[in-house]
Image (cartoon, helix red, strand yellow):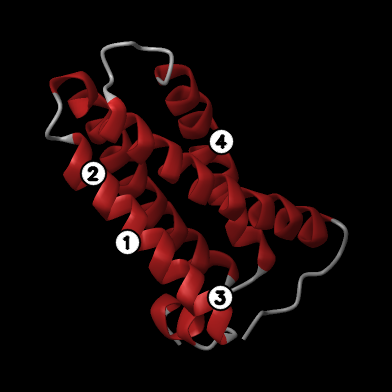
Amino acid sequence: MTFHEAMLSQPYWVVMWTRILGAVIVGTLVILIFSKATRRDALIIFVTHLAVLFVMGWLFKQVGYVRLLGIVHVFLWTPLVVYLFRRLGDRAITFPFRQTIWLLLLVLSISLAFDYLDVTRYLLGERASLV
């Protein structure tokens, strides 16, 4: 089973959440490149997203579709969330771009809440495959 097949075998709400998450990430990238003040942020988000995809695929091959996969988001998205939150203090970031960053922060934070919970549950012994 591939990672994508495993992900699609999850409950409907999880599949929809991953689609929303992906759409917000891609949408954020597209929007932020239109402002000189946020182009570097778009690049950082893009590189982080690529790293998540690569490392998640590698970890999936090592351990399967288990709760531990959330650790990839914990290690890569937590610093991204902190960085983006700090960037909101930059007055050069105008309203639509600031709102876009807030949306991404909201979506990543919700996802991170699930990821922190999943990693904790894995470390406490819930190591069964999720498929």
- Indicate the amino acid at tag 2: Leu
- The residue where tag 3 is placed is 14
Mark 4 highlights which residue?
78
The residue at the point 26 percent across, 23 percent down is: 94
Q: Is residue 17 left or right of residue 98?
A: right
Q: Where, quadrant-wise, is the N terminus in this rendering? A: bottom left
Most foreground residue, 15 or 127:
15
Residue 117 spot, x, y in % from top left: 75, 55
Label 1 – label 3 distance at C-alpha = 14 Å
How far is mark 2 from mark 3, CA to CA? 23 Å
Q: Residue at x 40, y 19 (%)?
A: 87
Disc 1, disc 4: CB below 8 Å?
A: no
Q: Nearer the viewer, residue 130 or 33?
A: 33
Expressed as whole percent of the image width and height from the top left, the position of residue 131 reads 62, 86
Q: Which mark is residue 29?
A: 2
Q: Residue furthest right?
A: 124
Instruction: Relative to 55, say whether 127 is above or below.
Output: below
Residues 107 and 69: in front is 107
Q: Are the residues tagged 2 and 1 within 8 Å (C-beta)?
A: no
In whole angstroms, how far apart are the C-alphas of marks 1 and 4?
Answer: 19 Å
28 in relation to 20, above or below: above
Q: Residues within 10 Å of mark 2 (few under 14, many from 20)?
A: many
The residues tagged by marks 2 and 4 sit, at their Cα atoms, a distance apart of 18 Å
Residue most toward the front? 95
Tell me which corner region of the image, top left, top right, bottom left or bottom right, holds residue 129. Answer: bottom right
Q: Nearer the viewer, mark 4 or mark 3?
A: 3
